[in-house]
Amino acid sequence: MSWPTWLPLRADLQALSAYGAPQVPAQAVLNTNENPYPPSLALQNAITDAIQKVTSNLNRYPDRDADVLRTRLARYINEGSGTDLQIKNIWAANGSNEIIQSIFLAFGAGVTLGFTPSYSMHPLIAKVTGTTWVDGARNSDLTFNLEVATSEVRAHKPALTFITTPNNPTGDAISLGDISQLADVVAECGGLLIVDEAYAEFSQEISAATLLADRPHVIVIRTMSKAFAFAGARLGYLVANEYVVDAMLLVRLPYHLSSLTQAAAEVALDYRRELLAGVSSLVTAREQLADSLHELGLRTIPSSANFLLFTGFNGSAPQLWAQLLEKGVLIRDVGLSGYLRVTIGNEADNQRFIDALKDLL
Ligand SMILES: Cc1ncc(COP(=O)(O)O)c(C=O)c1O
């Protein structure tokens, strides 16, 4: 993008490109790792009722610290992880992207290290907030390598080290043992370890939230956008030591989380069993889709998330991506040569994707 000379855009932003997963119409939308299951009618009605109650008070600012919601999010994490977290350990915002931004605003001095390919917004938000980003390496098959990671932490002594588990776009998960070893090295080097667990509910691994009691320098990021099928409502949160949460209060904008969002997210937590019931069917569908891709002669990285990264096709990734779109199937070209990523959809979406691939390969 070339900018007009009269626009005093910061020099360090001029070469960047905006996040831009294409939002184009398609019969099967399998590109942003959304959950394919829409809210049930009962949940829609419950959210409408809750919002109706809030609307009579819209002349007032929302609860600035989202106390009820944060207490309930702590309970949700405790239920799944056997932890004893409290409201003081949770911060909530408009999607985990806002959480990531707040982490950079509070702690992004010096260097941030991440092991790429991983979630593209980590380096982008680092750069936008003026933090130097360093790309750490992964194995040649794109999976996480603890030895490489620890030596890169020792070499760069980053203020922030990011890991994503399960990782986007590869889908591989990091064991709790590896995370705790990395956390110890990060602590020796005086930094914070950020564990982005956006897809945690799809994985069998134990959450890094269980490390917080002994390791105050670990921050876990979670979201309701994926397993909770709540991407449109925009609710992400972090689980961390109380001093981290105190630092979030310094950088947050006052009243950042609207009363409408807070009310809707509380209802979604009431319906968590119903919402999370979709997770196991998506995991089964993921394994079936991987088998179908293998039958077509393609290779996948074993995934613990709601998407698959696949390779082994002839021609370029942008070319196959465009041909699939012509057939009504929107997947994601994540910019990795020879690879494409597909989100697990409902049965009809997945079938349409496989049928389109069969025609094209
Ligand atoms: C690893 C990871 N973290 C964070 C996010 C952001 O999610 P949200 O802002 O919807 O909570 C995504 C979205 O795809 C993601 O893949």
Image (cartoon, rainbow, N blue to C red):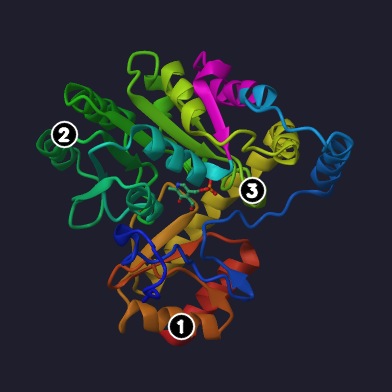
Q: Where is residue 73 in the image (x, y as percent from the top left)?
A: 60, 27
Q: State which mark lies toward you, 2 or 1.
A: 2
Q: What element carries label 3?
A: loop
Q: What element carries label 2?
A: loop
Q: How crowded is mark 1: few (under 14 residues within 10 Å), some or many (20 or more)?
A: some
Q: Taking the image as drawn, is residue 299 in sight?
A: no
What is the three-letter code of the residue carrying label 1? Ala
- Can you say whether 212 is above or below 129 in the image? above
Q: Which part of the image, by quadrant, shows the C terminus?
A: bottom left
Q: Taking the image as drawn, is residue 247 in sight?
A: yes
Q: Name the residue under label 2.
A: 157
- The yes-or-no answer for disc 3 within 8 Å of ligand 1 is no
Tell me which residue sits at (47%, 33%) in the image. 251
Q: Which part of the image, by quadrant, shows the N terminus?
A: bottom left
Query: Along the horizontal axis of the image, is 349 left or right of 148?
Result: right
- Can you say whether 183 is above or below 298 in the image? above
Q: Name the residue under label 3.
A: 229
Q: Is mark 1 on a helix, strand or loop?
A: helix
Q: Where is residue 94 in the image (x, y as percent from the top left)?
A: 59, 43
Q: Name the residue under label 1.
A: 322
What is the three-letter code of the residue carrying label 2? Lys
